[in-house]
Image: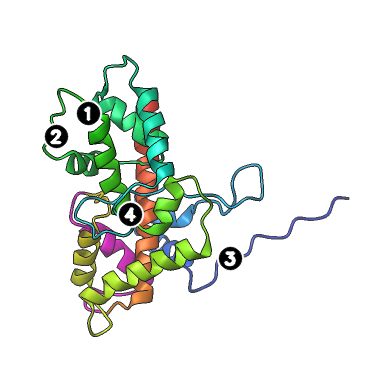
Amino acid sequence: MGVPKAPKLPPPAHSHEAAVQGLISRGLPISDVLDVVLTPRPSTAPGGSAPATPRPVMRGPRAQAGTWKELTPQEEKTIDAAFKKFDKYHSGKLEIHSFFDMCRSLDLHLNAKVAREWLGQLNKVDGLTLDQVKSICTSILAAQTPAVRSCTAGKALGLFDLQASEEYMRAAFKKFAPKGTVSAEGLRELLRSLDFPDVHCDHFDRYVGEWLLIVGKDDEAPINVHEFISCVNLLVDVCQRHQEALENELEK
């Protein structure tokens, strides 16, 4: 006889997964947010024991700078090579669809709305020159947290990157919460100021509403910095799932 498999233990009572299971059992319809909680990304990469690197979520131009405002020599070299690769007709310019393909190859995954904001008033008909591409990529990278910038550079995340990113989020929270907490509406405003992709196109109204249900809070309950960071972590997972679905659809 084989060794019997250990039964799958239920999630801890305080976990998001347990909370979502309870909400669904009481009749709440499954949504994209709840589904992400129930199917979290794996902690290790397929086929090995190495940590799984999450797909970076790109923030928009209204986000306060999270890192330095210049390209590193390695970043500049990488962008030069990518531009050359995607300039298939050697015209010295990239068409917009080629620019997006180049960005994805560099792990800069932009949803449509964020992409339009970064491109701004640039002449999209004539294409983008190498200098314009470098300028856009510099601005995009500067707006990201240290952890995201390390991911896009192909580096394994280190403790410094994670600590620097958390410090950035804490500083952003402090601006909106001088007394240590924010309201639900203050949380929505804070997420808008950080310029994460608004996947539901409703200024984070639905997302925050569902997150409050998951953590057992109402619209009047105060939200502290630890809860805010938890909210952001789940939002990043939701944004990743939406971006992956969009890219999979485009590849069909």
Indicate which disc, 4 or 2, sits on the residue closer to the N terminus. 2
SS at mark 1 in the image: strand
Whole-Å distance between the Cαs marked 4 and 1? 22 Å
Which of the 4 image quarters holds residue 231? bottom left
Mark 4 lies on residue: 144
Q: Which amino acid, by three-letter code, is at mark 3? A: Pro
Q: Is residue 211 magenta?
A: yes
Mark 3 lies on residue: 10
Mark 1 lies on residue: 128
Q: Which of marks 1 and 3 is in front?
A: 1
Whole-Å distance between the Cαs marked 2 and 1? 8 Å
Indicate which disc, 2 or 1, sits on the residue closer to the N terminus. 2
The span picked out in magenta is 201-221
Left or right: where 159 falls relative to 186: right
Circle 3 packing at 10 Å, graded few (<14), some (14-19), many (20+), is: few
Q: Do the residues labelled 2 and 1 touch (CB within 8 Å)?
A: yes
Q: Which amino acid, by three-letter code, is at mark 2? A: Leu
Indicate which disc, 2 or 3, sits on the residue closer to the N terminus. 3
Whole-Å distance between the Cαs marked 3 and 4? 36 Å
Q: Which of marks 3 and 4 is in front?
A: 4
Indicate which disc, 3 or 4, sits on the residue closer to the N terminus. 3
Where residue 69 sits in the image (x, y, percent)? 29, 53
SS at mark 4 in the image: loop
Does 116 appear above or below 219?
A: above
Q: Which amino acid, by three-letter code, is at mark 4? A: Gln
Where residue 136 sits in the image (x, y, percent)? 25, 41
Q: Nearer the viewer, residue 211 or 186?
A: 186
